[in-house]
Amino acid sequence: MPRVNPIDSDYFKDERPDDKFSVIGKTVQRSDALGHVTGRTEFFEDRTFPDLAHVKIHRSAHHHARINSVDVSEALRVPGVLRVITHRDVPSNWYMVLRLIGIEPNDEPVLAEDRVLYKGEPIVAVVADSEAAALEGAARVKVDYTVLPAVLDVEAALAPDAPVIKQAGTNYFVYEGHHARRLRFGDVEQGFAQADRIFEWRYSSAPIEHAPTETTGCVVVPQSSGRLLIHSNTQAAFFTLDNTALILDRPFTDLQVKGGTVGGGFGGKVDVMVEPLACIAATLTNRPVKFVYTREEEMQVSSPRAAERIYIKDGVMNDGRIVARKVMLYVDSGAYSRHSPYGTTKACAHLPGPYTIPNVYADCHCVYTNRTPSSAMRGFGVTIADFALESQMDRIARALEMDPLQFRLKNAYRDGDLKAHRKVAEGTALIEVIQRAAALVGHELPEEYQAMSSRGAGA
Amino acid sequence: MRIVNLKVNGVGKTFIARPETTLLLALREQLGLTGAKRGCAQGACGSCTVLLEGEPVVSCLVPAVTVDGADIATVEGLADGPALSHVQQAFLDGFATQCGFCTPGMIMSAEALLDRNPDPTRDEVNEAISGNVCRCTGYEPIVSAILDAAVRRREGAKL
């Protein structure tokens, strides 16, 4: 039986005069568990359709190259191949998933036109009677390239002499006219000048692949009404529906997405990677079409969590108060935007961590390189920033020979503090969480730290 | 092309298989038993685990024509009407599922373990499911559920 920790409702009791939880604190069975244990849960690929056709992709062999020509004649001669799809078959080829929330420009083609910006970028889709014929057809597509210099490092991509890989003219996403998502609060240089100690370190992370057990995929079924029914394992049914409709240049009402059952997502299934091409293939052949990534595709070309590089410089007083924090943060978006401009904004919104610091300066760059496009994954933007921020806190505490929890408590934000984003903090609980965690592991805190409260006077 | 006969969950089944038809695809696409999943199609994730003559196999690597006449058990055959197997019930009660994609394969590996070892240690359970990947990383409740199922089976046997 699962262990259920009782709810401790002592904290902030005056804010909740009436604690009547009917579900919280109780064991409630998952609504889908019976289907899981009996094998009856219906994942998208568990449906079978007569006359099902399959889509496979011919992908870029290079990180960065000009496409001189594409020859599909041999692919078309493979028995079972029904169609090849190139960018000319995509009604509205350029897109940006986040355009639905007003973010521009459309920077990614569904199928490459005259250039490829990452190894594995889709160039031609092959539709065939069988998966094997589609794979064979995709392998027989011939692309003539002129290889171009690749940019594979975020800081190298921002160097003045770096080759510009993006059509928009910069190797970074432009935030309201600026090179980065910026945070400016107080005077960070003055803060450094008054500080007793300066600490500056660099943190970096590699891309992380979600590797869901079920690979990304969909089956699109033409309906007698003329609509397309999309069985998908997307985590974002409406992002998928709307973006697919825009790419197809068809009304939203032409599409129906059936989803919600996802064999592991973790953020890796919020891009719109398979549905548009499967819809085009289904329309061109008037047959149900399956497009599902192989395990190799899932590992090689599905968007990972972005690699990040973060420099943090802190000015600290001898008593442990942080008086200035400067962060230069670089998110490797890879070749295209996907969700990374948003992730980078989230990283910036998370700075300077849950601490009250009077002088803060940050530039958070969403950088384009010739790597696999990165995108959403579990708290993207925040997770790696937290790794850097909390590593920084531990290192400073060590350098000051301070207890790391006391160092955090000393700088913890409290209700009423003005945050660097010029919002007044409310509902904070960092102090109480640290106090409780310390008690649980038997880490003794001095009386003055035990007496602290998020509801007390600000730092 | 060859005609293949299998006994699947105790029932005789006949189908035509190409040389490259895997047991997994035959089960899923020809016999309509979609409990076994295709996670990697290269024998690495265990989502397609079924029992072949009582032994767990990754059915994505078994050519169907090579197992003509065999006895196959899949997750669909475990429950007796609404009554779940001990392993299924323990997974349900122990919150040992998240997305559910690895669950059928995980359960078949567990059934095979408990068939040959009714009282496994935690290490033996870990070993038995070492070929089954759960990317939601819920291994702890899964291992606990299998140990719980072992107790239920032994107690059930005593009744």
Image: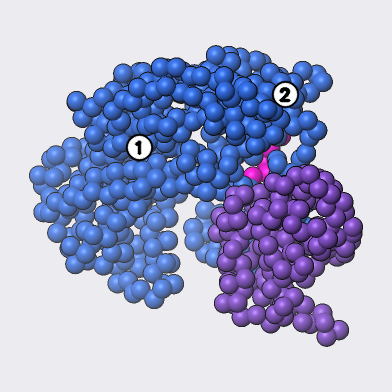
Chain colours: A blue, B purple
Residue A382 position within the rendered picture, expressed as x and y whole percent measured from the top left: 40, 45
Q: Which disc is residue A15 wearing?
A: none
**Numbered badge on residue A332:** 1
Question: Image point 21% across, 58% down: which residue?
Answer: A396
Q: Along the horizontal axis of the image, is B80 left or right of B144?
A: right
Look at the numbered disc 1 and give the secondary structure of its residue.
Answer: strand
Instruction: Establish if A242 lies above or below A302.
Output: above
Q: Mark 2 lies on which chain?
A: A
Check disc 1: other Cα within 10 Å, few if <14, some if 14-19, many if 20+.
many
Residue A341 drawn above or below residue B80:
above
Q: Which circle marks residue A228 in the picture? A: 2
Q: In this view, does A285 lie above or below A429?
A: above
Image coordinates for residue A108, horizontal then vertical, percent: 46, 23
Q: Which of A19 and B150 is in front in this view?
A: B150
The residue positioned 55% from the left and 14% from the top of the image is: A88
Q: In which quarter of the image is residue B88?
A: bottom right
Q: Residue at x 58, y 39 (%)?
A: A293
Q: Give the range drawn in magenta.
A: A256-262
The answer to the question of whether label 2 and label 1 lie on touching residues, with beta carbons closer than 8 A, is no
**Residue type highlighted by circle 1:** Asp
